Amino acid sequence: MKYYFVPSLFLFGTLFFGYLYISGPSSMTTRLVPHQGKGKGISYDTLERYKKEAQVKLEIQKQRAEIQKSINKPLLDPNFAKQNEFHETVISADVGPAASDTMEESINEPVNLDQQLDAFLAKKQRYEDLEKAQKQLYVKTFIKEAYKMGYEVKVNDKMEITSVKKLR
C-alpha cells in the first residue's frame, strides 16, 4: 500500500486540476458581499459587466467633451471659414461674362466632369443667345430712333449697317 499512495495522490491531483482547467473560471461564481453583510451579494460577472459599462460611458463622455471643445474653440482667423465655404474657379480670362454667370449659379452643381462641362456649355449657349437677342433689340431700337430723326438705316444679318439714307 505504501507504494500506491504517492502515485494515486499524483493521479488525484492531476484529475482535480484537469477538472478545474476544463470547467474554467466561468463556472465558479464568486459572491462579493458588502461590508455590512446586508442584502444580496453581487456576482463577479455582474461586477465586471458594470465595470465595462462604466468604461464605455466614460469614453462616450470624453468624446462628447472633445467634440464640444472643438466646436467652441475660437478661430485664429474668423473669416477663414467664410472664405473657404465657396471658391471661385476662373476657367479662362477670355471667356467673358458667361463664366461669371456660371459661377453665380453653383447651388446645384453637377457631379462628374462630363456633367460639369455639359452644364457649362449649356449656360454659355444661353448667355450667347441672350446676348444676341439684346443686340437685335438694340439694333431695332437704333433703327426706330434713326427713323424718328429722319434717317433710313438698313442692316444685314450680321447686324452691320449697310446703308443710310436721309428722308425728306
Image: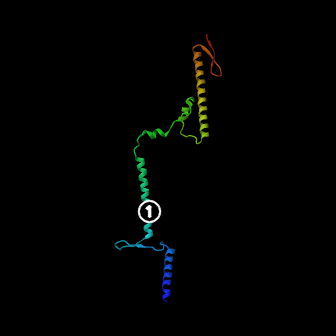
State whether residue 37 is above or below residue 111.
below
Q: Which residue of the protein is positioned furthest toward the front in this rendering? A: 3
Q: Residue furthest top?
A: 168
Q: Which residue is pictured at 49% across the width and 81% down the height?
A: 10
Task: Please provide percent x and percent y for residue 147.
Answer: 59, 16
Q: Residue at x 48, y 39 (%)?
A: 84
Does 2 appear above or below 31? below
Q: How many marks?
A: 1
Q: 33 or 27, which lies in front? A: 27
Crowding around mark 1 (Cα neighbors within 10 Å: few <14, some 14 to 19, many 20+) is few
Which of the image's four quarters has the C terminus?
A: top right
Residue 142 appears in which quarter of the rendering? Answer: top right
Q: Residue at x 58, y 22 (%)?
A: 138
Q: Position of residue 166 (x, y in %)?
A: 61, 11
Residue marked by disc 1: 53
Coordinates of residue 133 in the picture (x, y in percent): 60, 27
Instruction: Give the vertical position of 40 relative to 159 (above or below).
Output: below
**Circle 1 — which element?**
helix
Image height of 139 relative to 81, above or below: above
Q: Nearer the viewer, residue 32 or 160?
A: 32
